[in-house]
Image (spheres, grey):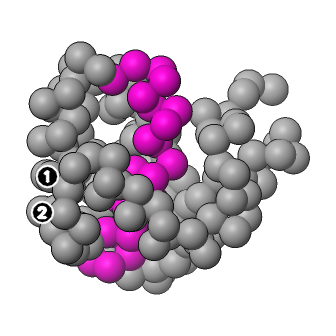
Amino acid sequence: MYQHILKGLNPYRDAFPSHLNELVQQVATGFNIPLEKLDHSVDSLYLIDYFLLDNVSAIDETFVKQHVLKLIAYLGEVYIANRGGKWIMILFEDNETWEPQIQSENGRIHSSFVAHVYATLMEDDYPSIRSCYFFSDGTSFV
């Protein structure tokens, strides 16, 4: 069994959806973005991307561990606001790690967007949260 990328990073466990407002506030504070600019529009994801590009040299494993959950929260909220759906929580096979996923209105579960957020932060020369909105499960989110 491999270790889940969110292991130890989701203190809210299956109550994650109850903490979304708090997590969005943390995005605003942590990324120096006025809260009112995080309006759940797809374009608001550019504001996060601009911050990431301006601070790309500071993005390391510590940065990712500190910010990945709040970025997942905001990205998911943007998806739900624009495409519909709801949060569901999946317990990983370690019986400890709860992974937030989005279930669209047609029942499709977007199970890989968490991995896309983690991967863009850890692996991309120019990380983009907005790109994670448009790419999940090999198909477009829009």
Q: State the image coordinates of residue 47 (x, y, percent, origin top left).
A: 15, 52
The quarter of the image holding the C terminus is: bottom left
- The crowding category of the residue bearing disc 1, from other C-alpha atoms within 10 Å (few below 14, some 14 to 19, many at least 20), is some
Q: Which residue is mark 1?
A: 46
Describe the element under mark 1 as helix, strand or loop: helix
Please name the amino acid that badge 2 sits on.
Asp
Quadrant in the rendering for residue 12: bottom right
Tell me the number on the disc at residue 9: none
The quarter of the image holding the N terminus is: top right
The span shown in magenta is 59-82
Relative vertical location of residue 4 with respect to residue 61 in this rendering, above or below? below
Q: Are marks 2 and 1 in contact (CB under 8 Å)?
A: yes
Q: Is residue 65 left or right of residue 50?
A: right
Q: Which residue is mark 2?
A: 43
- The crowding category of the residue bearing disc 2, from other C-alpha atoms within 10 Å (few below 14, some 14 to 19, many at least 20), is few
Describe the element under mark 2 as helix, strand or loop: loop
Q: CA distance from mark 2 to mark 1?
A: 6 Å
Residue extending furthest toward the right = 95
Residue occupying the point 38% across, 64% down:
25
Q: Is residue 24 left or right of residue 82?
A: right
Residue occupying the point 35% across, 30% down:
121
Q: State the image coordinates of residue 69 (x, y, percent, origin top left).
A: 51, 48
Residue occupying the point 49% across, 24% down:
62
Quadrant in the rendering for residue 79: bottom left
Q: State the image coordinates of residue 4 (x, y, percent, origin top left).
A: 68, 34
Relative vertical location of residue 27 with respect to residue 124 in this rendering, above or below? below
Please name the amino acid that badge 1 sits on.
Tyr
Counting the numbered discs, the total is 2
